[in-house]
Image (tube, grey):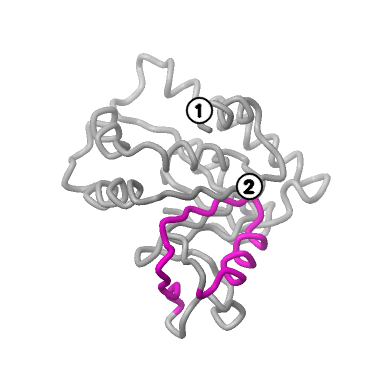
Amino acid sequence: MFVCGVAAQNAYEMLNEIIETGFCKTNFILSAGFGETAHGKQLEVNLRNKLKEKVQQVTFDTEIIPNEQYPLLNGANTLGYMWKDMINSVFVNQNKSSSTDASNQLIETSQSNIALLCQSGAFMISRISDMANKCSPIFSMSVGNQIDMSNVDFLEWLLQDDSYEQFIRKSGCNPADYEKLKELDQQKKTLMVYAMYIEGLNATDGARLIRLI
């Protein structure tokens, strides 16, 4: 995973190169200053177009290298995600939240079969803090500007209990290298509540969301 937290212009140059070269397949963009400014909006449009070109190349180019995948981007302007007992990319100090202990681990509650999907990272961490000692979501995600990955993409993935098998079959990768994904599929089966906060939808996401619901 590539985690990018530099200024928008520098982040844009790095991400352009990553999309072009395929240097990293999963990318998490903390950087603000994309959709929030006039210049940043154009950078965001450029990245969307470049990703679209890469997707078409990977999907339709018969000369492509076997198993090549286009890079996935989460962000920009996002706090990232938390999967209980596995990963926490949120950079907010734990002292500012009532939901985590001194080691920055989510405090356990009896109600944890929840996934929280938010566009706004600030909304995500404030809701988790507000729910402290009442519930502790297994998975919490913020997607920011949704340049690439969207809330609906993550909901779709959470609802798939065979994503490990699908990934291995389509990618041809060594299954032993992706045991963690298999474990995530097992945890996804325990989810009973999916909470979403969306400020805007990417093209076709509205129809996809209706079908998923």
Q: Name which residue lies at 32% across and 37% down.
A: 163
How far from the left and from the top, in percent, is residue 204?
62, 25
Report the side of 185 relative to 28 (left or right).
Answer: left
Q: Residue at x 44, y 46 (%)?
A: 26
In this rendering, the answer to whether 39 lies above or below 85 is above
Residue 8 in magenta? Answer: no
Residue 76 relative to residue 179: left or right: right
Q: Position of residue 47 (x, y in %)?
A: 63, 37
Res 190 label: none
Tag 1, which secondary structure? Answer: helix
Which of these two is toward me, 205 or 62? 205
From this view, report whether residue 138 is shown above or below residue 38.
below
Residue drawn at the location 43% of the way across and 64% of the way down: 111
Magenta region, residue range: 104-133
Tell me which label, 2 or 1, sits earlier in the chain: 2
SS of the residue under disc 2: helix
Percent across and percent down for residue 78 are 61, 56
Tell me the residue that label 2 is attached to. Answer: 12
Q: Where is residue 49? Give x, y as percent.
A: 63, 29
Using a 10 Å C-alpha cutoff, classify the residue at mark 2 as few (fewer than 14 neighbours), some (14 to 19) or many (20 or more): many
Image: 21 above or below 7 = above
128 part of magenta stretch: yes
What crowding class fits label 1: few (fewer than 14 Cα within 10 Å), some (14-19), or many (20 or more)? some
Please state which amino acid type lies under the numbered disc 2: Tyr
Q: Which residue is mark 1?
A: 54
Q: Amino acid at mark 1?
A: Lys
**Residue in the image at 70% along x and 35% along y:** 45
Total count of labels: 2
Asked whether the residues under the numbered discs 2 and 1 touch, taking CB atoms below 8 Å apart as contact, a structural biologist would say no
In the image shown, does 95 or 213 lie closer to the viewer?
213
